[in-house]
Image: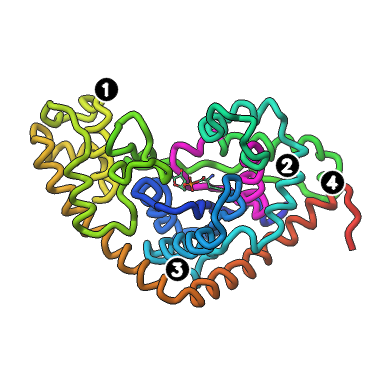
Amino acid sequence: MQETSKKIRVFSGVQPTGNLHLGNYLGAIKRFVALQDEHECLYCVVDLHAITVFQDPDELTHNTREVTAAFIAAGIDPTRQIIFNQSQVSGHAELAWIFNCVARLGWLNRMTQFKEKAGKDREKASAGLYVYPNLMAADILLYHATHVPVGEDQKQHLELARDIAQKFNNDFAKTIARADYADDFFPLPEPLIAGPATRVMSFRDGAKKMSKSDPSDLSRINLTDDQDAIAKKIRKAKTDPEPLPSEVEGLEARPEADNLIGIYAALAGTDKASVLGDYGGATFSTLKEALAELATAKLTPIGDEMRRLMADPEEIDRILADGAGRAHTIADPILAKTKDIIGFIRS
Ligand code: TYM
């Protein structure tokens, strides 16, 4: 049995595409921090994913540093865990190519995120955007990672990563057995989608998820927003005319109320039931006032720390290079074994 295939190892990634927001924080980054005390974690700034849609080179560099700063400002310790940018470890691209040859077109055709991102003019989408989920599977499996903390929107991609791992293990069962692996080679990674804010919705439309690319800045709280911007956006968030319910069931069919209560619960480190215990029957304006105060207290120190870190780009680049070196140490032997299993000659 290979030790690497049994041990818990956490991997997740965030795209450096600007406007990091409250959804990224509550659905992913805040949860990355919580996992670092218990497990070995790799947190990756996925620049190869970002370029599936054209990125201005200077902005890409800036945004890569900004996501790194956000990881650290939120509390991830880059000396204990690995923080790096994807393009510095070439194994991601190599394994992605192998997975392009494992994944089936039919599987990719079902990916809802491709349909949303490509929009109506699908012919003009990059080929990279189409095979994006194969690269994501490679990110995880290159490290034999077993657990992947993500928001709800990544669930389908994680299922595809499991399908790819399974098919690779089946296709190459003969050489995997010969290479003396008592167990399957690639672990089937588990998504970790948990907590009250796995899908944070837009402040302008409770049916749309909060996103980096929404043209309205009022739709999201950015991690770099100051106190006034945070308070203003919460004050202006869309609501309905009823008072807040006392039970969680009362949030059904009330997406805006559900969203604000979920955000409050995630920021306070509690659950929706307990927030409703305090605010059931209250008006939205009471909740919004309390939420603005809580969000400011939790988020502005992160924004301030991000700005402080961004003032020293060389230090951020040094952290990324150090993380990439350590990521290589884990990835290289796994990639080498993958090549042996496939039958590639290597020196
Ligand atoms: P990305 O960059 O779009 O988002 C980063 C993380 O934030 C989560 N997220 C949300 N969570 C709750 N509510 C929202 N409104 C919201 N918006 C975004 C995402 O689910 C994600 O966890 N494909 C990935 C990046 C990636 C990756 C990976 C993740 C590349 N390789 C390997 C895990 C493992 C993405 O585009 O995330």
Dot 2 amino acid type: Phe
Labels 2 and 4: the sequence-earlier one? 2
User: In this orientation, does residue 306 appear?
Assistant: yes
Q: Which mark is residue 99?
A: 2
Q: The residue under label 4 is which amino acid type?
A: Ile
Q: Where residue 199 appears, x then y in whole percent?
A: 38, 38
Q: Give the Cα separation between the discs numbered 4 and 1.
A: 51 Å
**On-image quarter of the C terminus:** bottom right
Q: Amino acid at mark 3?
A: Asp
Q: Which mark is residue 342?
A: 4
Which label is found at residue 253?
A: 1
The answer to whether the residue labelled 4 contacts the one labelled 1, judged by CB atoms less than 8 Å apart, is: no
Label 3 crowd bin: few (<14), some (14–19), many (20+), radius 10 Å: some
Looking at the magenta stretch, what is its main secondary structure?
helix
In front: label 2 or label 3:
2
Q: Write the residue at 41% across / 46% down.
A: 212
Point out residue 146 in the picture as x, y percentages from the top left corner: 58, 48
Which of label 2 and label 4 is nearer to you? 2
Q: Earlier in the sequence, mark 2 or mark 3?
A: 3
